[in-house]
Image: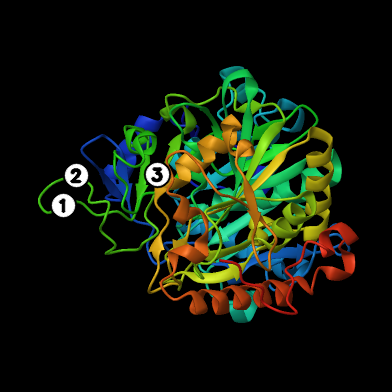
Amino acid sequence: MAIEKMNLSYLDFTPIYTYRNLPIQELIDRSIEAGYGQLNDTGALMVDTGEFTGRSPKDRFIVLDDCTQSTVDWNSINQPFSSADFDVLFDQMRSYINTQQPELYVRDVYACADADYRLNVRVINELPWQNIFAHNMFIEPSLDGLNRFEPDWHVIAVPSFKADPDEVGTRQENFSIINFSKKIILIGGSAYTGEIKKGIFSVLNFVLPKKECVLSMHCSANKGEEDDVAIFFGLSGTGKTTLSADASRQLIGDDEHGWGYEGVFNFEGGCYAKVIDLSPEKEPEIFGAIKHGALLENVRCFPDTNKVDFSNTEVTQNTRVSYPIDHISNSALPSKGGHPKNIFMLTYDAFGVLPPISKLSEGQAMYQFISGFTSKVAGTEAGVNEPQSTFSACYGAPFMPLHPMEYASMLGDKMREHNTNVWLVNTGLTGGAYGTGQRMKLSHTRALIKAALSGELDQASFVSMPVFGFAIPQSCPGVPAEVLNPRSTWADKTAYDAMLFKLAQAFTKNFKQYAPKASTEVLLAAPILPELVVTE
């Protein structure tokens, strides 16, 4: 429906036209008419997000007040922002909207597929195609739900509004600021849509563990027959979307989930997938989802065509598509499942020393979860042009307002209660470090995960990995035995041993910040550093 002069008086917004919950086709038409984008050959809308083609974590803040002072884990990621500066910024943004923006696009949506934990979110956008993103990524209420909709939270995203850092305390002109007391997220200076979804993800990561005892997770999830649920932890670029979009299993979701009393549920209503080098052969489900209603970001077409060249990195390596989850033919609706039987912790190892798969003990699983080792993949964040090894607690530190041990303790409790298997999967490099090694073959990763899900991998013989102590299977159908042991893939074994020791030292150094609050079980799962033991 389109409503002129819609009543947004509680925010003191008075633009000439405010359009609420427009049909997607109308939003597409308005985007094309305004020159924001065009259709590709499959009917998806292609747009550019401008200066920012990835998140800007250094410009994300949380308002420091009575609600957050003693609960948020304040650090270089969870940066405090004064309540007074937020009020000034909000007033400036409101004035800008009322005087410079003749149109606003409003979308009323839900977060959380489980109604017991549902959050009502009103997304207010400057651009019509941002509103398509909100439609794709959140859960659409029924007509009756829209008629009775009362927002719990507001997300206000106005890319053309830029802050004055000297006046309001931002780092630069762009910003993303969460105010838990006022239940408002302000986003300005950037049109990168990922800021919208990750803002609400951060909200749920604060609210659900504290209020509902729900473990919030940066993961994808799917399920097989008899509600055989699997979840995949990992940062962007590690393969969450790719590996969970399995034709033989139902997709619950590709990025954000909760683990509650009844099982796993999706926070979102859609998927936001990287499309760099996308092909129908490697990722047929995602490729097929790019059709009418999907939103492609920062892609380029082959010359004189509207056919997307998915290998083109002219704008960014972080090319993206958002689409409703029902664009995946085998998606689970509603997006829920039981308690997971298997957890896969995905890491892009730029050191090239971790096995393609290994089984973790309970203590090792918690240690790895707290550590969240991976590599930032090129383009996911502004300024990242090649893989950079890093540690991101809970595989999602940029979105976790609480101390990592709070999430890790909940994970350990749920693993024990439901007897869940945990596997560490390296989707990164093998045969050498960055510059020498090759990306792990997707076919091998898929075969290993399939064997773990079916129980075949449990029947294999395992050897203990030096230093880390992970259990490495010695055989798996469809995977050459030499691939399973990472040391055997390196031509220079001495170089491998040195790199393994270097990685272990990096883990140890990173974990020092969490050790004071870690249990004995977790501390005993740390890499053993006194001497490097090598076995052929």
**Quadrant position of the C terminus in the picture:** bottom right
Q: Tell whether label 1 touches label 3 (CB within 8 Å).
A: no
In this rendered view, identify the residue nearer to me: 127 or 95. Answer: 127
Tell me if residue 331 comes above or below residue 451 in the rendering.
above
Mark toward the viewer: 3 or 1: 3
Residue 131 image offset from top left, x and y in percent: 46, 42
| Circle 3 residue | 443
Which residue type does callout 1 highlight?
Answer: Phe
Q: Is residue 282 left or right of residue 344?
A: left
| Circle 2 residue | 307
**For the residue labelled by badge 3, is the local secondary structure a helix, a strand or a loop?**
helix
Q: CA distance from mark 1 to mark 2?
A: 6 Å
Q: How many marks?
A: 3
In this rendered view, identify the residue nearer to me: 72 or 407. Answer: 407
Please tell me which residue is depicted at 20% across the width and 51% down the height of the picture: 301
In this rendered view, identify the residue nearer to me: 44 or 169. Answer: 44
Q: Earlier in the sequence, mark 1 or mark 2?
A: 1
| Circle 1 residue | 302
Which residue type does callout 2 highlight?
Answer: Lys
**For the residue labelled by badge 1, is the local secondary structure a helix, a strand or a loop?**
loop
